[in-house]
Amino acid sequence: SDSAFILVNASGSNANAGLVLDPGTADSDASVYLGAQDTGWLISQDVSADILRFYDYTGTPGVRMAIANGTGNVGIGTDSPAYLLDVQGRVQFGDIIYLAANSVDNDWHLGAWNGDRFAIVESDVKERFTIDEGGNVGIGDSSPDYGLDVVDDINSDDCFREAGAQVAGTC
């Protein structure tokens, strides 16, 4: 019944409330509704799965984000995150992704580097891999002049070809 709810800025029913707090019970989920229940947000503590879920009712209903109690795993687009960050669907990053391991001194960065190329960079020191806006690939070269531009020795267990013709090795 409505007596179990705390309504704030309501116009007489739960569906038109600005804020609804439902404390739930030992067997039912506790919930917070922001905006109207069918057009706003719902934050719900799922007692059976021990997970905090964020629902968006302004478009297609569904879980937008979930936080699993115990593991702290965060899910975006999934209601059962299996990893520290578990994203289902497309992700857009505006700039650079930073990767760091706790056991090494080197950090790795990948993304749009200096606005004109994709790069994998070690600790902001050296570009290890580059794809420029023309499609040229550089390994150890941040400004590749050819389809593949390598700054270092190249090793192959097979053969090298130029325009389909064997240049070196056994094909």
Image (spheres, grey):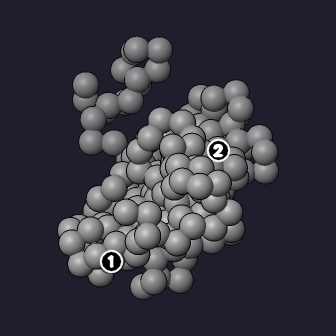
Label disc, if present, on residue 69 of the rendered structure: 1
* Residue 60 versus residue 104 in the image, above or below: above
- Location of residue 19 in the rendering, given as x and y in whole percent from the top left corner: 60, 63
Label disc, if present, on residue 35 of the rendered structure: none
Could you tell me the amino acid type at mark 2? Phe
| Mark 1 crowdedness (10 Å alpha carbons): few <14, some 14-19, many ≥20 | few
Say whether residue 143 is left or right of residue 21.
right
Label disc, if present, on residue 118 of the rendered structure: 2
* Residue 97 versus residue 124 in the image, above or below: above
Please state which of the two labelled residues, at mark 1 or mark 2, is closer to the viewer.
Answer: 1
Q: Nearer the viewer, residue 79 or 131?
A: 79
Q: Nearer the viewer, residue 17 or 32?
A: 17
Q: Determine the image quadrant of residue 122.
A: bottom right
Give the residue displayed 32% in from the left and 67% down from the top. 29
| Distance in Å between CA atoms under marks 1 and 2 | 37 Å
Give the residue displayed 68% in from the left and 63% down from the top. 9
- Location of residue 121 in the rendering, given as x and y in whole percent from the top left corner: 62, 60
Q: Determine the image quadrant of residue 75.
A: bottom left
Does the residue at mark 1 contact the one at mark 2 (Cβ under 8 Å)?
A: no
* Residue 38 versus residue 60 in the image, above or below: below
| Mark 2 crowdedness (10 Å alpha carbons): few <14, some 14-19, many ≥20 | many
Q: Determine the image quadrant of residue 160.
A: top left
| Residue 101 appears anywhere in the view | yes
- Location of residue 34 in the rendering, given as x and y in whole percent from the top left corner: 59, 59
